[in-house]
Amino acid sequence: MVLKTNRKIGLLIKTGLMVIVAGCISGSALGQSAHVNPWAPKPLGTLPPPASLSKGVWLKGELHMHSRHSKESSNNSISKIIAFCKLVGIDFLAITDHDNHVEGDVAHNTWADPEFKSDSVLLLYAAEWTTTRGHGNAFSAKPYDHQKLYDVRDQRDTVVGRIKNSLGIHLSANHPSGKDHFGYSYDMVNSIEVWNSAIWSKNANAIMIWDDMLSSGRKLTGRGGSDAHHGVPVGDEKASPNTYQAKANYAGTPTTWVFATARTKQAVIDALTNGRVSISSNPYAPRVEFYADLNGDDKMDMMMGDNVKATGKPVKFKVQLTGNSIRDTTYTINIVKNGNPFTSLKMDGKTPVVEFTDTPAIAGRTYYRVTVEGPATPYPQVPQSAALSGNMVGLSNPICFNFDPNF
Ligand SMILES: [Zn+2]
Ligand SMILES: [Zn+2]
């Protein structure tokens, strides 16, 4: 009994000592708190109101595709790619041939190809910037001097960034966690390839990098791209050892959707930059749309890609699938908040809408994004792609609060 009491006292003394020690540590930490981080976020000025949610058009596209001008590509002429895009309803297309295969002279190769024209598909001027430090896609609505970007590839990022800005192009980090990952500063890119090819599972680390960039204040758009190099042989074309890929990964696996203010190349690029973008596993899969009602009037005020100041009031968020949702199924809607799982909701395929409410913090940045899981939508023209994408149906870009546009 005595022994027990002594032990108890001993424990009390020990606990007391720990409290005192802990008190000393926090006291001394408090004593040194005169430091002010000069980089701490400053109060935000006025943010521009979100653009109209109705004045615009949803367009679907392929943003990473190689034609015969990339040396390792097979049976993939530009006319074949464009005809395929037309067939499956793709609205915009970036043929992104490796620039190193033509020493930077994309203008006299891919863009000068007589087949590089279309009366219905919006053809972006694009190339895959292929460098020692990895790959990025350059996108533009009009021709630009790609040679300059190629020539500067081994210079310091500050120099590269200057050239990139002077060209007025949209630069995008390619397959950021794969082979030849983008190895330059993310401060010079406008978007990041978070879904490369039909093989969804290999993108996990790309998503992690995207969340890290968003969490640290870089409002980068997430986009998709098949990175397909090989077409199906027709006529007297001979199959190559890689021909099998054409049935598993081709234009539209995945498909990037943009909400563009008009059906023009520039509007596609602008949407890609502002983030009114979502990605679907293929052109026939449903499109994810993500909205928020800021004042409780049940009218949506902003969508993915938009950024407003948090008011401290609860925000109602709405996720909906548009297009070919499968009626007799249940989709799983995963909400990610600031890089972490926030909640998971079930959505009925018959009425494919779900809502949730949360109050974004008044201080500091907050973002929400959505991934949708469910049954695959068949893509008959690329029949083996559905199995590779598994149950990944689509993902949205983030809805943002308190992001600094001048970051
Ligand atoms: Zn690449
Ligand atoms: Zn590529």
Image (cartoon, helix red, strand yellow):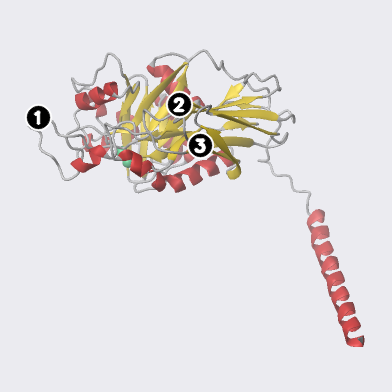
Residue at mark 1? 235
Q: Earlier in the sequence, mark 3 or mark 1?
A: 1
Tell which tag, 2 or 1, sits nearer the viewer: 1
Residue 324: x, y in percent? 42, 26
Q: Residues within 10 Å of mark 2 (few under 14, many from 20)?
A: many
Residue 88: x, y in percent? 30, 24
Residue 50: x, y in percent? 60, 20
Under mark 2, the amino acid is Leu
Under mark 1, the amino acid is Gly
Under mark 3, the amino acid is Thr
Q: Does residue 364 show up?
A: yes
Q: Earlier in the sequence, mark 2 or mark 1?
A: 1
Q: Which residue: 51% across, 25% down? A: 274
Real-space Cα distance between discs 3 and 2? Answer: 30 Å
Q: In the rendered view, does 295 fall on the left or right side of 303?
A: right
Q: Which residue: 25% across, 38% down? A: 247
Tell which tag, 3 or 1, sits nearer the viewer: 3
Name which quarter of the figure residue 127 lies in: top left
Residue at mark 2? 272
